[in-house]
Image: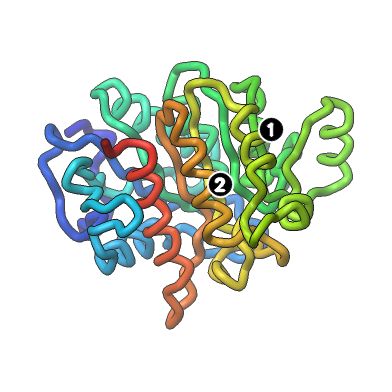
């Protein structure tokens, strides 16, 4: 393995077991980083908690009628060794990890940690992609608290790398972000609108078609778990009421599986013992997404 992937702690593996790296089709990249967190700290423990929770998943998926991991060997890297004092260096480390994984023909699944790491993952793909974001927050500030690599600025950085960004579940932004949205004629999929348009308790097919139509053939997906309603995911750094529900997100992911999804991340889980529902949801959603996107 590359020196980049050296571990800084106890070895843990997604699902509790490990195929050979050569056989793996998916590589999980844990990034224990939350240096720019502005409210609830502790998301640096999110990757470890998600991986722990994944060992309790049933491997058989009722919907897909198979053990996803049988067709899709999943390898877990050691936690990336990162510079907690330098957002720029952390982004570069994530970029290099994803670049290496992609060069080996494998799919990257990045576990955060805070949302800022997404810009590094997308940069590491070194290809033009559209981006689907599930999130409560627009994350479109130019910079925040002295750095343009803040979790609150990540989608501003992403929009500098991709012309096609679809932001779903949004329900919180500042006046600077609101002005940026208006000036650039950005269409956001606000949580309130999606909820009001629901049919039979599910996001309307019309809204799902609009979301998918904004994406190109090659897609990267970033899931900030605060996009979910906090009744489902209370363990996150900046919870916002009025969010998406479990089947809302699954329906979107199933629709996006018609595209070529080149990778995804799961960020902003803040473990809150003794409760485990936030990290378990993240672990299960990641498994479902792998199944939708890459199992045959």
- What residue is at 26 percent from the left and 53 percent from the top? 65
- What residue is at 46 percent from the left and 31 percent from the top? 258
Query: Horizontal and vertical percent for residue 287?
Result: 34, 52
Query: Horizontal and vertical percent for residue 37?
Result: 61, 55
Dividing the picture into quadrants, the one containing residue 274 is bottom left
Name the side, left or right, on which 143 lies relative to 161.
right
Checking the image for residue 115, the label placed there is: 2
- What residue is at 64 percent from the left and 51 percent from the top? 203
- What residue is at 26 percent from the left and 36 percent from the top? 296
Residue topped by disc 1: 156
Q: Nearer the viewer, residue 76 or 56?
A: 56
Name the side, left or right, on which 53 lies relative to 183.
left
What is the count of numbered marks?
2
Query: Horizontal and vertical percent for residue 44?
Result: 46, 58
As drawn, 157 above or below 10: above
Q: Quadrant of the N terminus?
A: top left
* Label 1: how many Cα within 10 Å (few below 14, some 14–19, many 20+): many
* Label 2: how many Cα within 10 Å (few below 14, some 14–19, many 20+): many
Task: Assess whether mark 1 and mark 2 are in contact (beta carbons under 8 angstroms).
Answer: no
Q: Nearer the viewer, residue 80 or 180?
A: 180
What is the residue that sits farthest to the top in this orientation? 127
Q: Nearer the viewer, residue 272 or 234?
A: 234
Of the two numbered discs 2 and 1 on the same chain, state the one appearing first in sequence. Answer: 2
Q: CA distance from mark 2 to mark 1?
A: 12 Å
Dividing the picture into quadrants, the one containing residue 207 is top right
What is the residue that sits farthest to the front in this orientation? 200
Name the side, left or right, on which 151 lies relative to 113.
right
Query: Horizontal and vertical percent for residue 216?
Result: 56, 21
Name the side, left or right, on which 74 lies relative to 244.
left
Per the image, label 1 sits on a secondary structure element best described as helix
As drawn, 91 above or below 203: above
């Amino acid at each position: 393995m590359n020196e980049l992937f050296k571990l800084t702690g106890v070895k843990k593996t997604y699902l509790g077991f490990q195929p050979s790296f050569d056989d793996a089709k998916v590589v999980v990249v844990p990034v224990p980083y939350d240096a720019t967190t502005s409210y609830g700290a502790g998301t640096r423990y999110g990757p470890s908690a998600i991986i722990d929770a994944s060992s309790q998943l049933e491997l058989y998926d009722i919907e897909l009628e198979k053990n996803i991991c049988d067709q899709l060997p999943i390898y877990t890297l050691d936690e990336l060794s990162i510079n907690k004092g330098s957002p720029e260096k952390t982004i570069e480390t994530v970029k290099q990890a994803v670049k290496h994984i992609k060069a080996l023909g494998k799919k990257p699944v990045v576990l955060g940690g805070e949302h800022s790491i997404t810009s590094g993952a997308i940069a590491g793909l070194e290809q033009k992609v559209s981006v689907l974001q599930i999130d409560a927050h627009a994350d479109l500030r130019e910079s925040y608290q002295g750095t343009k690599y803040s979790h609150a600025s990540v989608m501003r950085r992403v929009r500098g790398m991709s012309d096609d960004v679809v932001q779903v579940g949004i329900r919180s932004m500042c006046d600077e972000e609101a002005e940026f949205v208006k000036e650039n004629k950005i269409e956001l999929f606000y949580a309130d609108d999606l909820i009001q348009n629901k049919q039979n308790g599910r996001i309307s097919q019309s809204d799902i078609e609009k979301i998918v139509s904004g994406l190109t053939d090659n897609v990267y997906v970033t899931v900030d778990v605060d996009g979910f309603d906090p009744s489902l995911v209370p363990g996150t750094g900046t919870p916002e009421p009025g969010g998406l529900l479990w089947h809302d997100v699954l329906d979107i992911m199933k629709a996006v599986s018609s595209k070529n999804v080149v990778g995804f991340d799961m960020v902003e889980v803040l473990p809150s013992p003794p409760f485990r529902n936030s990290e378990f949801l993240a672990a299960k959603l990641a498994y479902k997404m792998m199944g939708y996107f890459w199992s045959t």
